[in-house]
Structure formats: C-alpha cells, structure tokens
C-alpha cells in the first residue's frame, strides 16, 4: 500500500507592521526562510522618510512586501535596468531582493515606497520622468537616513558612459517607456532625478506636491503649463532647469545599487 503524500508545509505567517498610527499596514513575506532583522528596521526608516516628504496615503492602505531570493548574476545582467532586477512595485505589492547592505536596501525601499505612495495618492500616475526622478530622490533620502545612525556615507558615482548618452530636456520629458541599453538607463535615471530635484528646489516641498498632483491625471497638461500659469516660471527658469540635467552643473546622483 502506497503511503499518502505528505501535506505541503504551511506558509510562514508574514510579519505585520503598522505606520502612521495604523493608517498604513505592511505585511512582509519571507523568501524561503526567516525575515532578516535588517528588513523591518530599514523599512521603518524608509517609510518615515518618504511619508515626511510626500505625505501618507489618503486613506487606510495595506502594502505587501515580498522578499525574493538572490537572483543569479546572469539574470541581473540581462535585466532592462537595475531596479527591475532588484525591486519592483505593482499596485499594493513590492517585490525586492533585500541583500545585506542597509544603505542599498534603504534606497530600494525608499524608491519603491515613493512609487507606491504616489500610486495611492494619484492612481493615474505622473509621467515617467517625474515618477522615476522622484522615486530616486526618495531612495537617496532613505539611504541617507539609514546611513546617519551607522555613521556611514552614501556613495553615488556617475553612471557609466553618461556623457555620451545624455538626453535633451525635450527628449527626457517625452520618454514614455524605459530605455533598453544600460548606458541610456543610467542617463535616464540620473537626468530624471536631476530635473525633479531642481523643480523641488525651485518650488519647495508643498508646491512641488501640488505640481505632482497637476501632472498625475489621465490627460495631464504640458509639463511647463502649470509652472508658467501657477508659479510664474519664465524662459530663464526653464533654461535653469535644462542646465541641471547636465553633469557639469549637478553633483553625481546614481542610486547605490
């Protein structure tokens, strides 16, 4: 008589965390093992950092974070861009490879939390350059926040081959799909972050969040229209913005992946 098959082991219960006085509930699912202590500790830092800058979701929300096992190097190398290989957000789910470096993990979490909170606040989502540029800024801020208690420094060198693959301002603004070549990917993320950073510097946090909302609609206006009509940008202001997406005019800002 053949013995009946053994029942499959029950999946481990996710770790449940709450933020913003219970407004945000987060479930962390492990990857074939216990959840590293580094993950909830770093998530708390990243969540505080991003919500301080962008605000909380407009209503109670639940986020699931699924930790992934390490990806073979050859698969990472073939990915369209690093974020796709190491972290990704879709609706109320984030999947990421946590790794062992708290600063890199903080960047990945900050980046994806920016996408998630933007999605919760503005389901139509902003243009690609605005969404990814803001996410890189939030990732960098989370990494800096994680570095302070560790007395570490966030290293962000320029992307490889950046000078030969820079986009013009108009080309950057009209991208509606991710570049495929690694050097173009690096230039896109660097320049998107530079442009969004300059806008935040010029507008201030609250006005920038209003600008983000203005462009996060199903049929957004031209990117410069709200800047001219509401915040009285002139041609000199737009030339100033264009200068900020050139490496000679801005500090290096590649994510610490």
Image (tube, rainbow, N blue to C red):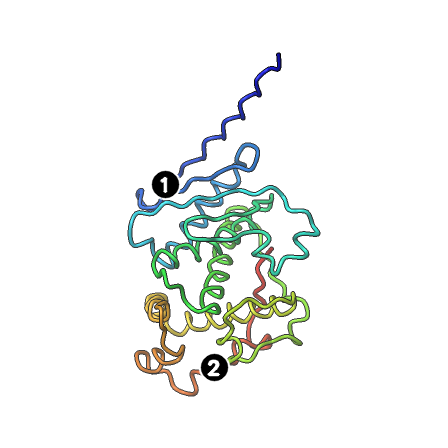
Measuring from the top left, give residue 131's x and y in whole percent: 45, 64
- Which residue reaches farthest bottom? 235
Few, some or many C-alpha atoms within 10 Å of disc 1 (few <14, some 14-19, many ≥20)? few
Q: How many marks?
A: 2
Image quarter where the C terminus lies is bottom right
x 54%, y 26%: residue? 8
In the rendered image, the vertical position of residue 41 relative to residue 221, given as above or below:
above
> In the drawing, what numbered circle is on residue 114?
none
Image-based side of 242 in relation to 217, left or right = right
Image quadrant where one finds the N terminus: top right
Of helix, strand and loop, which one carries label 2? helix
**Numbered mark located on residue 240 in the image:** 2
Do tag 2 and tag 1 residues touch (Cβ < 8 Å)? no
Nearer the observer, 127 or 247: 127
**Residue 76 at x, y percent in the picture:** 65, 53
Identify which residue is drawn at 40% across, 42% down.
26
Q: Which residue is drawn at 46% across and 58% down?
A: 138
Element on which disc 1 rests: strand
Mark with earlier residue (2, 1):
1
Judged from this view, the residue extending furthest toward the front is 1
Q: Is residue 98 left or right of residue 208?
A: right
When the figure is inspected, residue 158 is found, relative to residue 35, above or below; the finding is below
- Residue 56: x and y in percent read 33, 53
Q: Where is residue 226 in the image (x, y as percent from the top left)?
A: 34, 78
Residue at the right extreme of this rendering: 74
Which one is in front in this view, the residue at disc 2 or the one at disc 1?
1
Which label is found at residue 18? 1
């Amino acid at each position: 008589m053949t013995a009946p098959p053994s029942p499959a082991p029950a999946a481990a219960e996710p770790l449940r965390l709450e933020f913003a006085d219970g407004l945000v509930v987060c479930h962390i699912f492990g990857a074939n093992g216990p959840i590293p202590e580094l993950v909830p500790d770093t998530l708390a830092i990243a969540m505080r950092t991003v919500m301080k800058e962008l605000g909380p979701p407009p209503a109670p929300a639940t986020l699931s974070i699924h930790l992934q096992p390490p990806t073979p190097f050859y698969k990472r190398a073939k990915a369209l861009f690093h974020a796709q290989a190491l972290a990704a957000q879709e609706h109320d789910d984030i999947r990421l490879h946590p790794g062992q470096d708290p600063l890199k993990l903080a960047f990945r979490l900050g980046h994806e939390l920016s996408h998630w909170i933007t999605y919760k606040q503005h389901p139509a989502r902003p243009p690609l350059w605005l969404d990814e540029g803001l996410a890189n800024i939030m990732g960098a801020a989370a990494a800096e926040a994680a570095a302070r208690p560790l007395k570490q420094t966030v290293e962000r060198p320029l992307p490889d081959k950046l000078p030969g693959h820079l986009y013009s301002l108009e080309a950057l603004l009209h991208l509606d799909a991710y570049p495929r070549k690694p050097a173009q990917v690096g230039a896109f993320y660097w320049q998107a972050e530079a442009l969004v950073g300059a806008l935040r510097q010029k507008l201030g946090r609250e006005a920038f969040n209003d600008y983000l909302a203005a462009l996060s609609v199903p049929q957004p206006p031209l990117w410069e229209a709200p800047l001219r009509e509401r915040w009285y940008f002139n041609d000199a202001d737009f030339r100033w913005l264009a200068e900020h997406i050139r490496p000679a005019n801005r500090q290096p800002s590649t994510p610490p992946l």
